[in-house]
Image (cartoon, rainbow, N blue to C red):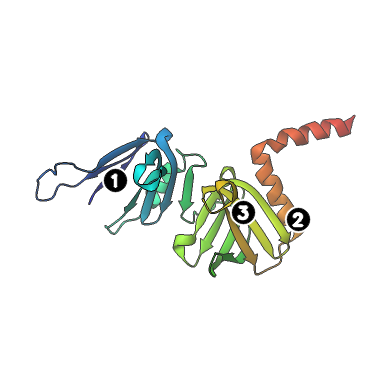
């Protein structure tokens, strides 16, 4: 048991002393944001993946997982963190989009079975609202490496979330679509994603060439 503190500077944890007695080796850690390799936040849990090696796990990066015991959530902390962390932030929280361009019911395919929900596309983010809240995600466009589709009823979102079982350590989310995804919507989503990566410059250059 202890207190987790999230500030503009970083994240820290300090163990609560039992019966007022300080333990010989109290658990206390502090991480600046630059020392966090990935931070996953859900409604009731937060996981910090560091750059430190764990000698007991053959050098795997050490991570720390915290669970809320009070009747509270990490919703407010998420609002702070999404303005402090880049693609190292994994938001297992369905954010409220200010402008939903379109949405579609889907099934998220997992290794064994899957879960169902709704995929919402906004002007600057994509939200997956799962019936299993723990599987929900919010991706800013900067959190997405690529999107792909093999047909109008399938969509894959490849993210920068770490996943050792996926190619290149990137995690892919495969969705079966319950409604047909129109080509115009897919193309618009692809363009929005790639414009966030600098395609706007290429488009401007192409426009200048075509105008000659």
- Kindly report which numbered mark, 3 or 2, lies closer to the viewer in this rendering: 3
Q: Quadrant of the C terminus?
A: top right
Distance from disc 1 to disc 2, alpha carbons, whole Å, reads: 45 Å
Residue 50 screen position, x and y as percent: 40, 40
Residue occupying the point 12% across, 43% down: 22
* Quadrant housing residue 48: top left
Q: Earlier in the sequence, mark 1 or mark 2?
A: 1
Residue occupying the point 73% across, 60% down: 150
The residue indicated by pointer 1 is 4
Residue 136 screen position, x and y as percent: 49, 59
Residue occupying the point 75% across, 34% down: 202
* Quadrant housing residue 105: bottom right
The residue indicated by pointer 2 is 184
Q: Is residue 147 above or below residue 55?
A: below
Residue 127 screen position, x and y as percent: 55, 55
Q: Earlier in the sequence, mark 3 or mark 2?
A: 3
Q: Which mark is residue 157?
A: 3
Secondary element at tag 2:
helix
| 77 left or right of 174 in image | left
Q: Which mark is residue 14?
A: none
Q: Is residue 184 above or below residue 192?
A: below
């Amino acid at each position: 048991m202890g207190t987790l503190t999230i500030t503009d500077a970083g994240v820290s944890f300090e163990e609560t002393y039992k019966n007022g007695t300080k333990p010989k080796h109290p658990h206390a850690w502090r991480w600046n944001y630059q020392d966090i390799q990935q931070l996953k936040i859900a409604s009731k849990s937060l996981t910090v993946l560091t750059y430190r090696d764990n000698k007991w796990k053959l050098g795997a990066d050490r991570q720390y997982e915290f669970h809320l015991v009070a009747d509270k959530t990490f919703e407010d902390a998420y609002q702070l963190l999404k303005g402090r962390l880049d693609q190292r932030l994994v938001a297992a929280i369905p954010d409220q989009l200010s402008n939903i361009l379109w949405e579609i019911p889907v099934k998220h395919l997992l290794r064994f079975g899957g879960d169902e929900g709704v995929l919402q596309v906004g002007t600057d983010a994509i939200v997956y609202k799962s019936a299993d809240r723990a599987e929900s995600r919010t991706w800013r466009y900067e959190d997405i490496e690529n999107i792909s589709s093999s047909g109008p009823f399938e969509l894959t979102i490849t993210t920068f979330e770490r996943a050792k079982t996926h190619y290149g350590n990137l995690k892919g989310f495969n969705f079966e679509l319950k409604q047909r995804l129109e080509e115009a919507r897919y193309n618009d989503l692809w363009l929005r994603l790639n414009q966030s990566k600098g395609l706007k410059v290429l488009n401007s250059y192409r426009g200048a060439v075509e105008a000659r």
